[in-house]
Amino acid sequence: MQKGILITFEGIEGSGKSTHMRLAGEFLLQKGYRLLCTHEPGGSLLGEGIRRLLLQRGVTLSPLAELFLFCADRAQHLNEVILPALEEEKVILCDRFTDSTTAYQGYGRGIDLEVIEEANMWATGGLRPHLTILLDCDPEVGLSRVGERDRLEDEDLDFHRRVREGYLEIARGEPERVRVVVTNWRDKEEVQGEIRGHLLQVLRRIG
């Protein structure tokens, strides 16, 4: 087996990615995989401080300041958490990674995609997920599931529509890596079954 496998979960607010990542983690543990579950922003001591700043309502950030904070968080997270886990040959499940930056700061905020790509490259050293599960749902449906909103969740509907379209554009460009799983009002067990199928297919091929 190669050194570790990185699997990311992506999606707009309220898409169910955090819930389904947790359920997928429980499934993989039952299958005997050595697992690390983590998240961005956050996932490291420095990152949790950046997370509070990024998500705090009432904080005004320029699009570029927001981009660089996310990338600083990612660079620290990578070196402190992800790379050591890959060296230990673990399966890593990460709630958000580089695709979030492309979707939110690129398509959502309108920062040039080449700038986003270069920033992601500096933050990750070119590390790419082996598999990305994109939980897709209509923004109206997703936002209806969100309780108390943070700074990003509080953006208007058009912003979340742009983010969703960004995610789908990423998936269209990399269909082998990014597997789209539609949630909307589907049964949770049905969605989880589809996710598990994608996970096992990739883990058997790579591992």
Image (spheres, rainbow, N blue to C red):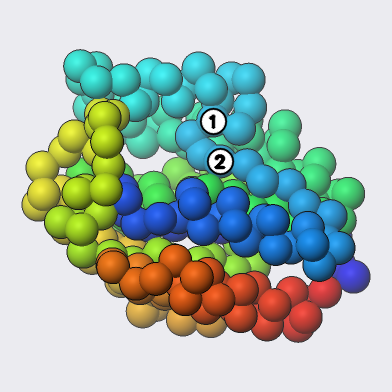
Q: Name the residue under label 1.
A: 42
Q: Can residue 79 be seen in this view?
A: yes
Residue 158, label in figure:
none
Q: What element carries label 1?
A: loop
Measuring from the top left, give residue 183's x and y in whole percent. Answer: 35, 68
User: In the figure, is residue 12 to the left or right of 9?
Assistant: left
Q: Which residue is identified by label 2?
A: 39
Tell me which residue sits at (39%, 47%) in the image. Answer: 101
Seen in the picture, residue 150 relative to 29 is either above or below; the reply is above
Indicate the quadrant containing the N terminus: top left, top right, bottom left or bottom right.
bottom right
Q: Residue at x 84, y 55 (%)?
A: 34
Question: How far across and down, in percent of the image, does residue 133 sit?
Answer: 50, 67
Q: What residue type is labelled 2?
A: His
The answer to whether 204 is drawn above or below residue 73 in the figure is: below
**Position in image of residue 176 (x %, y %):** 53, 81
In the image, taking residue 65 as reference, residue 78 lies left or right, namely right
Which residue occupies 81% across, 41% down?
84
